[in-house]
Image (cartoon, grey):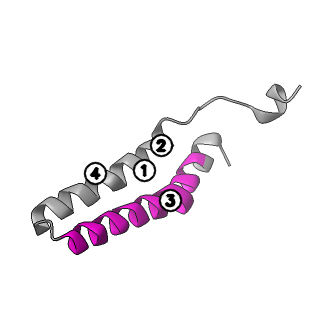
């Protein structure tokens, strides 16, 4: 599997569920605090995007074996 294949598999397997969890936690917190539904939806979408952007800002070219020396 190529490195881009590994990255896309990692995005689907790890980062998308994390983004979904962050969005759900934010939505439930906003619901408990009584924030209007439109604002809660936008806040949860931003939280999901923020977590998933961590995947986008990861390094593309670091080879662990080469840098362990």
Q: What residue did someone put label 2 on?
A: 54
* Residue shown at the point (19%, 63%) measured from the top left: 40
User: Mark 1 near mark 4, Cβ–Cβ under 8 Å?
Assistant: no
Q: Earlier in the sequence, mark 1 or mark 4?
A: 4
Q: Residues within 10 Å of mark 4 (few under 14, many from 20)?
A: some
Marks 4 and 2 sit apart, C-alpha to C-alpha, by 13 Å
From the viewer's perspective, is the residue at label 2 or at label 3 nearer? 2
Residue 1 located left or right of residue 69:
left
- Residue 43 coordinates in the image, percent (x, y): 23, 56
Q: Secondary structure at mark 1?
A: helix
Q: Of residues 50 and 16, which is closer to you in this image?
A: 50
The crowding category of the residue bearing disc 1, from other C-alpha atoms within 10 Å (few below 14, some 14 to 19, many at least 20), is: some
Q: CA distance from mark 3 to mark 4?
A: 18 Å
Q: First in sequence: mark 3 or mark 4?
A: 3
Alpha carbon distance from label 1 to label 2:
6 Å
Q: Nearer the viewer, residue 61 or 44?
A: 44
Placement of 7 over or under 64, stated as above or below: below
| Residue 13 falls in image quadrant | bottom right
Q: Which residue is mark 4?
A: 46
The residue shown at (55%, 59%) is 14
Please tell me how crowded label 2 is: few (under 14), some (14-19), or many (20+) other residues with Cα within 10 Å.
few
**Percent of width and height locating residue 5:** 59, 48
Residues at discs 1 and 2 in contact (Cβ within 8 Å): yes
Query: Mark 3 vs mark 1: which is more N-terminal?
Result: 3
Stretch in magenta: 7-33
Q: Quick check: marks 3 and 4 in contact, CB under 8 Å? A: no
Q: Nearest to the eye among marks 3 and 4: give it.
A: 4
The residue that disc 3 covers is 12
Q: Position of residue 61 (x, y in %)?
A: 64, 29
**Circle 3 Cα neighbour tier, 10 Å, few/some/many (<14 / 14–19 / ≥20):** few
Q: Which residue is mark 1?
A: 51
Question: Residue 22: x and y, percent?
Answer: 40, 61
């Amino acid at each position: 599997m190529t490195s881009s294949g590994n990255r896309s598999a990692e995005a689907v397997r790890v980062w998308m569920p994390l983004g979904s969890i962050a969005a759900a936690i934010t939505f439930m917190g906003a619901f408990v605090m009584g924030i209007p539904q439109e604002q809660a939806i936008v806040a949860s979408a931003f939280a999901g995007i923020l977590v998933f952007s961590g995947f986008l800002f990861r390094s593309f070219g670091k080879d662990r074996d080469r840098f362990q020396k």
